[in-house]
Image (cartoon, helix red, strand yellow):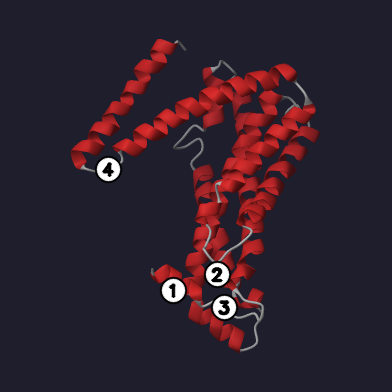
Amino acid sequence: MSTTALCISAMLLIIPIAISIKEKLHIAKELIVASIRAVIQLVILGFILHFIFDLNSPWILILFVLVIIVNASWNTIGRASKIMHNVFWISFIAIFIGTALPLIVIVAAGAIKFTGNELIPIAGMLANNGLIAINLAYQNLDRSFVREYGTIECKLSLGASPKLASKSAVQESIKLAIVPTIDSVKTYGLVSIPGMMSGLIISGVDPLQAIKFQLLVVFIHTTATIMSALIATYLSYKQFFNNRDQLIGSMLDENEE
């Protein structure tokens, strides 16, 4: 693809910008800033990846994957409830396990090689899916505890442990966090051709071979999403209780504000 062709395709953004201005959606500025940021960030990433691929050092690859996980973890902080603490470390543990375990398995199985051009893109996909799932889990966990505040308090008063009393809230949070992933997987091949498969087909890879790689991604990113959401939620829910296993009442006031 030529730079000229890319610039011409970028002009398509004029359409949503014009619609935003005409309909007073107030997203034109945000869209322009986001597009400029994407260009700058991807260009920088391109140079960094070019450098890493040339070095071809296992330690540099591991370090770069860690940087991806740290960045993903940092971007979950703003979605957590105000009463939660150690959000970064909880997210880091969840995303690290959700990313590292599938990577280890597929590298050990020989599905991908331990090289930059194969490891880094997949690590980025897994960490990003973990990030999205955790953000949804945090938001849903906060809403669930507020909505079921009375029910949970009632269960606690009858002698239930915090884990038992908040079981339905925790389960609902995890379920709502992973439903988008499951729904998207259901439509693969019927409604959409997934990104990796599309890219491979465009680059000339046989469709059947492209399907194998896409199924690999489906298996590992679904695993990463569920694991990340599950770990983050179970490491977080106890923060809605104080040291005496009582619900923290301030969460209601914060949500009313």
Give the residue at mark 2: 169
Circle 2 SS class: helix
Which corner quadrant of the image does residue 102 belong to?
A: top right
Query: x%, y% of residue 118?
Result: 68, 26
Measure how far apart labels 2 and 1 are at the Cα level.
19 Å
Q: How far across and down, in percent of the image, does residue 158 sit?
A: 61, 89
Say which residue label 3 marks: 247
At numbered mark 4, what does the secondary structure look like: helix, strand or loop?
A: loop
Q: Quadrant of the C terminus?
A: bottom left
Say which element carries label 1.
Answer: helix
> Which percent across, then down, holds residue 116?
70, 25
Q: CA distance from mark 3 to mark 2?
A: 13 Å
Residue carrying label 4? 26
The residue at the far bottom in this view is 158
The amino acid marked with disc number 4 is His
Residue type highlighted by circle 2 = Ala
Q: Which mark is residue 253?
A: 1
* Amino acid carrying mark 3 in the image: Leu
Which is more toward the observer, 172 or 124?
Answer: 124
Dot 1, crowdedness within 10 Å: few (<14), some or many (≥20)? Answer: few
> Which comes sooner in the sequence, label 3 or label 4?
4
Camera sees residue 188: yes
